[in-house]
Amino acid sequence: MASHLLHHFKALSYLFFLLFIYHNTAMATLTFKPIKANCATTRYTDNSPFSTNLKTLLSTLKDKSSSSISINETAGKAPATVFGLYFCTGDLSKDNCQACIQTAIKDIIDSCPSSKQAIIWYDYCELRYSDTNFFGLPDTNGFSMINVNENTTSSRPVEVVSQLVKDAPLAQPLMFKSQAFISESLYALAQCSSDLRSKGCSDCLTTIFANIKACCTSSKGWRFLAPSCWIRLLSSLTKNAPAMAGFFYTIVREKRNMLYGLALCRGDLQNKRDDCQSCLNDASRSIVEDCPSKAQAIEWYEKCFVKYSNQRFFGMLDTVNRTLCGVEQVSADADCATEKLARSLINDAVKNKKFVSAGKVVISSSLSSYVLVQCSRDLSKGRCMQCLQRGMDKVSCECKLTNGWRYLSGSCTLRYETFPFFDTAIISTVSL
Ligand SMILES: *[C@@H]1O[C@H](CO)[C@@H](O)[C@H](O)[C@H]1NC(C)=O
Ligand SMILES: *[C@@H]1O[C@H](CO)[C@@H](O)[C@H](O)[C@H]1NC(C)=O
Ligand SMILES: *[C@@H]1O[C@H](CO)[C@@H](O)[C@H](O)[C@H]1NC(C)=O
């Protein structure tokens, strides 16, 4: 592609999509790894009343986790009573909450063997027990975490979280509040454990928020996890980008602020996760900087593609498009052979499970055409076909007799070059 075109379409240069792993973070089974465990050094002995009561408590919590997102419970009579609670982030599905708590129940025993008091924290849940009655007491003795890779000078995150710190204590019964801002790729939450009343929740959140302000607000993402309350801020798109070449979308389940995102990495990056991840990071950062006030945006990059919207777009044909034409001429025969190849690849792509097809046609001893066509996998077959055919009609009309073209849309892409721009090894892996 001629360099003057690239000046105009910096972000569009060398796009190709080829990708494949479909990942829905909203429905996927999440994996739960403990972030941290605090264990008291006071111990109980096996077969003591405390030990029995702890078993009872954990089994009650396990049962309740199938129906409740946040709960506090006691087990046994004084002086061996065990006090316990768990909570999941208020927007976690019941299934994922149950899975997180079940993991936590196993992990807390392994992490804090025979401890009379223990707390374990995860990204999405917390589990805590103690031999003393801590119910109703805001415990702010937690820890902060930051995203060290990105700094910010924006005051928005602090404003957003200030509001959540005010609102969450009043949001009964969960005392959970979250907010997503599409244009800023910002997602924040505040939450308290169920044993606190509004006043205690407010005290807890205010205290940990002051801690965060003292250390961490120059970072782009941060959190403070205390035993009795949490606050958390993250950049939604980058945070949810899977550490693999792939296709994901994310749904932030705050009713009025749904954010739908989709990202695609080049298929040959499936084994180069860092490349894919860094492309997605750059893309989602620049989408925020280039389109600060838009509720939807698309950017095409060499190695990936990122799109987000406040409208649910999955399955819908997106006609936002760009066309790029090569600047050198080829013969009418070459043009014709290329179009014929492209049209047959379109038919193949629609039948292909991954909605992609790539191929090569030899025009002469010194000239070949390479074509790759692909749809985003949220489309139906019919819409994929429609998207590719309309794109083909457009490039064949606008890029007559040229030595390359690209059609880039939010739903499909077509590309032709006279050099092998994709790893031709994939031709054998794609049905042609
Ligand atoms: C962010 O700021 C801190 C100091 O406030 C600095 O040490 C760190 O290197 C910065 N990180 C980046 C990625 O700029
Ligand atoms: C939960 O905690 C509150 C105190 O804040 C207490 O009144 C209530 O009895 C506890 N619930 C259970 C089941 O222990
Ligand atoms: C491409 O975008 C233009 C508007 O910029 C629109 O009129 C046209 O229908 C689109 N074409 C296709 C094939 O998506």
Image (tube, rainbow, N blue to C red):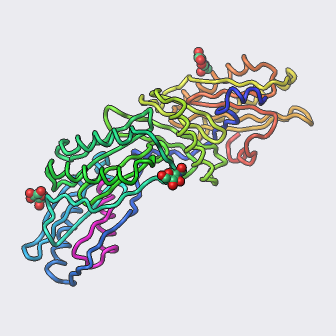
Pinpoint residue 349: horizontal percent, then vertical percent: 64, 35
- From the image, which quarter does the C terminus lie in? top right
Q: Residue at x 72, y 17 (%)?
A: 398
Pinpoint residue 96: horizontal percent, then vertical percent: 33, 53
Q: Residue at x 72, y 47 (%)?
A: 428
Count of marks, rendered view: 0
Q: Which residues are magenta?
A: 97-122
Q: For the view shown, which residue lies furthest in the right direction?
A: 365
Viewer-side residue, 377 vs 275: 275
Viewer-side residue, 394 vs 389: 394
Q: Residue at x 78, y 33 (%)?
A: 417
- Res 120 visible: yes
Relative side of 292 to 40, left or right: right
Q: For the view shown, which residue lies furthest in the left direction?
A: 78
- From the image, which quarter does the N terminus lie in? top right
Reply yes or no: does residue 115 show up in magenta: yes
Res. 5 image quadrant: top right
Q: Is residue 326 above or below residue 268?
A: above
Res. 215 image quadrant: bottom left
Relative side of 240 to 43, left or right: right
Q: Residue at x 92, y 36 (%)?
A: 365
- Res 69 visible: no
Pinpoint residue 420: horizontal percent, then vertical percent: 78, 40
